[in-house]
């Protein structure tokens, strides 16, 4: 049963091996005369047929052992994607607020994980992480930050928390 890819090829090889063993066994059964030899041949062919039926189960067990590895890789990919999204949101927020006269040092973005689809849930910004660019001293920082980020990320103003 040699197969390079795909469940259909594996299934075809499996069926071919079972068919081959059955045909060879039947022909041998017809050619050998009755007696002890026929009983031994029946036992050997039954064992070979049984093994050919069980082999896919052993492959399935091996695949289950590898499941943990694939799950770990998938988790690492999801964390990488989430971190990239966080970095992107922070960079965009910094640049938009800079245009409005506010220097943003850091922010915490909370994402809702819906089967690997991360949606922005809330933004938490410490007021100590905000600065005013020279010439913009007259602006209302909490109002500008809330309005800008709310419009930028299409979330409710209540989801932007300034502490």
Image (cartoon, helix red, strand yellow):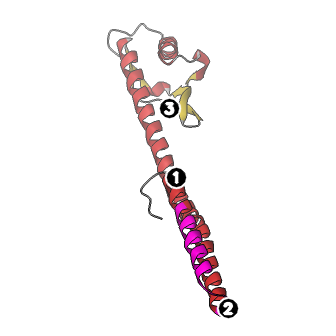
Distance CA(mark 3)–CA(mark 1) = 45 Å
Q: Which residues are magenta?
A: 16-36
Q: Residue 91, located in which quarter of the rendered image?
A: top left
Kindly indicate whether the residue at mark 1 contacts the one at mark 2 (C-beta within 8 angstroms).
no
Q: Is residue 28 magenta?
A: yes
Q: Residue 134, located in which quarter of the rendered image?
A: top left
Q: Which residue shows up at 49% across the image and 47% down it?
A: 74
Which SS class for mark 1?
helix
**Depth check: 25 or 65 in front?**
25
Q: Which residue shows up at 62% across the image and 78% down it?
A: 30
| Residue behind mark 1 | 7
Q: Residues within 10 Å of mark 3 (few under 14, many from 20)?
A: some
Camera sees residue 158: yes
| Residue behind mark 3 | 108
Closer to the N terminus: mark 2 or mark 1? 1
| Residue behind mark 2 | 35
Q: What percent of the width, then of the height, locates residue 155?
A: 56, 18
């Amino acid at each position: 049963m040699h197969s390079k890819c795909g469940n259909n090829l594996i299934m075809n090889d499996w069926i071919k091996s079972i068919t081959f063993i059955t045909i060879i066994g039947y022909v041998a059964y017809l050619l050998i005369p009755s007696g002890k030899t026929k009983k031994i041949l029946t036992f050997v062919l039954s064992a070979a047929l049984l093994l050919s039926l069980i082999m896919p189960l052993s492959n399935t067990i091996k695949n289950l052992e590898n499941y943990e590895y694939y799950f770990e890789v998938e988790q690492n990919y999801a964390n990488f994607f989430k971190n990239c999204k966080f970095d992107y949101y922070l960079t965009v927020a910094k640049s938009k607020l800079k245009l409005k006269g506010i220097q943003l040092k850091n922010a915490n973005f909370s994402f809702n994980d819906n089967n690997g689809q991360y949606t922005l849930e809330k933004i938490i910004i410490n007021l100590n992480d905000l600065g005013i660019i020279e010439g913009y001293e007259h602006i209302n920082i909490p109002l500008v930050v809330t309005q800008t980020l709310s419009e930028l990320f299409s979330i409710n103003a209540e989801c932007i928390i300034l502490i």
